[in-house]
Image (cartoon, rainbow, N blue to C red):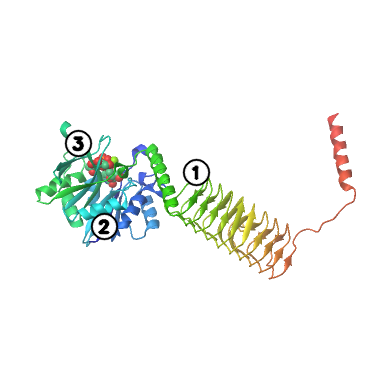
């Protein structure tokens, strides 16, 4: 059975107190809605439709980046969850299969749960994901008759008797797409909120002789984000899970609670992650690599047995080959560092290619920006860059070439050559002593 995902994400999220639409707030370095999408993706959906409203343009741009196949439709006015689903009609034209409705602000409904939901469609026309709520509060209640779901009643519209039900609606629903669209078209808004409730499709279905049932999951999977406090709590949960997963996959985290992951971080087996490391989005660390304390990595690739840090910053586009060594207070950006190459101290290497086993001394700087354009630096294999070399790009240093300490390299250095580009030293006998004596004399005069 082919699957379509419909992710509801039109809400403003008033309680976030933000100019950003709620689903664009970050969790694990990814927009909130991407988490629902990521779990839904395990169902291998043939189509994905995001129903956006507030800040739809931002949502669309972010969705494109995640997967260009996603369709974003705009719900101009937020008239309710049923109305939101109806907006997916055109995007689902010609689609034959089941639709799964997810909420963009609910990041933890897992793949296994969604698989059970879809599986249950074999025994009912509509399947709702419910949960036993510790405190049912204002959730919609699932009114069951045996294992049949007869209707969902919203808290506002519920009788005291119905409010006593603890089985609640998560919002996740699965039905054949065509049926779902027919059902939402029949839902009215004659209720306490004056909204078109998606939940009303259960009663409409039953009037049509269709069956509905519920599958349940742990309440933790249904956690929705409405406030910054809830987002922070979700981040805590996300991080705890990411750490457990990294360890389960064979990474050594010396102080797990201090390591910060993104949703797409990949850490290889036997990689060692020291305390206080931040993995911003887009990082892959291969087996056996070691990330030393207080390093910040973003959108980069660290190959086997490479060592990074302590206090290193790998910025987007950094590629470290096997066994490369990046030491303390080194920043690398958009650069390939060859196998076994070393940049061990206080350096900036940007827009560069560094050959295998090259050695960049302390304080090496690639001067890659002329104030208008960026230029590349190429350093050959086994080249030796003396400490405090300024490499004024575009510039190439050949294989096995050397630059002497303190050089400002503005022209290419041929392979095997030694470049000396610094002022020659002059020693003036006794001048230091005379110089300071004069300064002291001036100061003494002023003091009077
Ligand atoms: C909804 C359910 C309720 C359930 C609860 C679980 C309905 C009528 N009620 O209530 O049974 O217990 O979720 O959290 O479905 N949205 C749109 N467009 C709209 C309205 C909502 O995209 O016009 C989106 C929101 O951005 C949000 C989701 O749908 O992601 C749910 O909307 P929300 O207003 O939070 O519904 P609840 O009142 O919480
Ligand atoms: Mg809600």
Q: Is residue 134 left or right of residue 263?
A: left
Q: Residues within 10 Å of mark 1 (few under 14, many from 20)?
A: some
In which quadrant of this rendering is ligand 2 seen? top left
Mark closest to the chain's N terminus, 3 or 1: 3
Please tell me which residue lies in front, 392 or 446: 392
Residue at horizontal 85 percent and vertical 39 percent from the top: 439
Q: Where in the figure is residue 305, as x and y percent of width and height?
A: 55, 59
Q: Residues within 10 Å of mark 2 (few under 14, many from 20)?
A: many
The reply to whether the residue tagged 3 has its Cβ within 8 angstroms of ligand 1 is no
Q: Quadrant of the C terminus?
A: top right
Q: CA distance from mark 3 to mark 2?
A: 31 Å
Q: CA distance from mark 3 to mark 1?
A: 41 Å
The reply to whether the residue tagged 2 has its Cβ within 8 angstroms of ligand 1 is no
Q: Which residue is mark 2?
A: 4
Q: Marks 1 and 2: in contact by CB < 8 Å?
A: no
Please tell me which residue lies in front, 17 or 121: 121
């Amino acid at each position: 059975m082919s699957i379509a995902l419909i992710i509801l994400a039109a809400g403003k999220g008033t309680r976030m107190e933000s100019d950003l639409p709620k689903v664009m707030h970050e969790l694990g370095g990814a927009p909130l809605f991407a988490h629902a999408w990521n779990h839904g993706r395990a169902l291998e959906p043939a189509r994905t439709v995001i129903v956006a409203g507030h800040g739809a343009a931002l949502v669309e741009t972010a969705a494109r980046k995640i997967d260009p196949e996603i369709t974003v439709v705009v719900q101009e006015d937020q008239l309710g969850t049923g109305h939101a689903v109806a907006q997916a009609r055109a995007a689902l034209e010609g689609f034959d299969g089941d639709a799964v409705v997810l909420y963009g602000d609910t990041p933890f409904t897992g793949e296994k749960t969604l698989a059970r939901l879809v599986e249950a469609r074999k025994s009912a026309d509509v399947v709702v994901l419910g949960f036993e709520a510790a405190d049912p509060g204002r959730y919609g209640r699932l009114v069951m008759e045996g294992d049949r779901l007869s209707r969902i009643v919203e808290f506002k519209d519920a009788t005291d008797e119905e409010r006593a039900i603890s089985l609640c609606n998560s919002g996740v629903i699965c039905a054949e797409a065509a049926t779902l669209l027919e059902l939402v078209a029949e839902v009215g808004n004659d209720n306490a909120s004056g909204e078109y409730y998606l939940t009303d499709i259960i009663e409409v279905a039953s009037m049509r002789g269709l069956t509905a049932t519920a599958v349940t999951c742990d309440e933790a999977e249904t956690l929705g984000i409405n406030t910054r406090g809830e987002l922070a709590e979700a981040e805590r949960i996300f991080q705890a899970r990411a750490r457990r997963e990294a360890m389960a996959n064979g990474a050594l985290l010396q102080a797990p609670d201090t390591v910060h992951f993104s949703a797409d971080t990949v850490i290889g087996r036997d990689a060692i992650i020291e305390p206080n490391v931040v993995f911003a989005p887009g990082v892959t660390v291969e087996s056996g690599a070691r990330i030393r304390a207080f390093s910040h990595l973003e959108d980069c690739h660290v190959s086997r047995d490479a060592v990074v840090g302590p206090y290193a910053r790998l910025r987007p586009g950094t590629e470290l080959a096997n066994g490369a060594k990046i030491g303390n207070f080194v920043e690398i950006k958009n650069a390939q560092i060859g196998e076994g190459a070393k940049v061990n101290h206080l350096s900036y290497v940007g827009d560069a290619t560094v050959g295998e086993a090259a050695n960049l001394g302390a304080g090496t700087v690639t001067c890659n920006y002329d104030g208008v354009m960026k230029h590349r630096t190429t350093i050959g294999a086994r080249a030796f860059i003396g400490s405090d070399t300024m490499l004024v790009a575009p510039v190439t240093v050949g294989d096995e070439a050397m630059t002497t300490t303190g050089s400002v390299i503005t022209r290419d250095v041929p392979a095997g050559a030694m470049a000396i580009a610094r002022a020659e030293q002059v020693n003036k006998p006794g001048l230091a002593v005379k110089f300071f004596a004069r300064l002291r004399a001036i100061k003494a005069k002023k003091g009077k």
